[in-house]
Image (cartoon, rainbow, N blue to C red):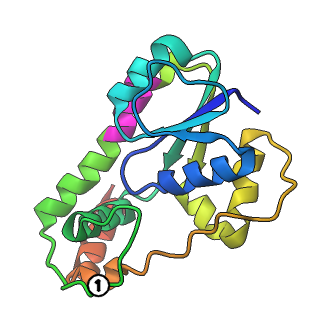
Amino acid sequence: MAPCYIVAGGGRTGSHWVQEMIRHITGYELIKHTPDCLPAQTVFHTHDQSDLMACADFMSHHAVLVLSKRRDYFHQAMSLAVAMHTDEWHEYSAQEVEPIELSFDALDWLMYRCRVWNEEFDRNVRPRYHSIIEIDYEDLRSTGHRAEQLVAQRLGIVYDRPPGVYQAPNHRDYTKIIANYDQLARFTAGLVSAH
């Protein structure tokens, strides 16, 4: 195991889920503030690339940076729109949510935001870290209850414990909350197929 892990990702990539799985697998403690240094056996989580740049100066050779990503920017943007609408980011209430209309411009901006986070990471952060492990949200979802095994495998850790962190699907179904979801999906699919 690495002395410490830094978990990062743009919003709606499952990074909080990855953070909790790493904590369960390793038994490491969560650091909840931007550290001046990361003590051994800790996990630090951030969405802020300036935190990653600051950590790189003193951690790049002995911390493992775990990048939580999503391949599908459309669904990441849909999830982001719902999170912004409900103000629920990784813990969800049972409160009913009124459907919203999402404009094409808003969708375009959200997808742009998702893409740019990854481009800036590749340009500014990636070159500063010695060890980066990428974990795709879609891969985690496809494994169901075995997601923790996948994370352990990617980290190079022998997985010898019962699964402890299973994230049930978010009951905030953005295909229902975003009233014009089908129209936006068709529009986006048309843009992708045109390229």
Q: The disc labelled 1 sits on which kind of residue? A: Gln
Query: From the viewer's perspective, is 141 left or right of 171?
Result: right
Classify residue 73 as left or right of residue 134.
left
Disc 1 residue crowd, few under 14, some 14–19, many 20+, Cα 10 Å:
few
- Residue 70, image x, y percentages: 47, 54
Expressed as whole percent of the image width and height from the top left, the position of residue 178 reads 23, 79
Classify the position of the N terminus by image quarter: top right
Note whether 156 is above or below 186 in the view shown: above
Q: Secondary structure at mark 1?
A: loop
Say whether residue 58 is left or right of residue 115.
right
Disc tally is 1
Is 24 magenta? The answer is: no
Residue at image position (49%, 57%) is 14
The region drawn magenta spans 117-125
Camera-side residue: 59 or 154?
Answer: 59
Quadrant position of residue 2? top right
Question: Residue at image x 56%, y 17%?
Answer: 60
- Name the quadrant containing residue 85: bottom left
**Along the viewing direction, whichever of 94 and 6 lies nearer the viewer:** 94
Residue designated by label 1: 95
Q: Give the residue drawn at x 55%, y 24%.
A: 38
- Main secondary structure type of the part rendered in magenta: helix
* Left or right of residue 23, residue 106 in this image: left
The foreground one among 80 and 7 is 7
Among all residues in the image, which is located at the extreme top? 57
Q: Looking at the figure, which quarter contains the C terminus?
A: bottom left
Residue pictured at 20% horizontal, 62% vertical: 107
Residue 82 drawn at (x, y percent):
27, 70
Would you identify the image quadrant in which residue 156 lies?
Answer: top right
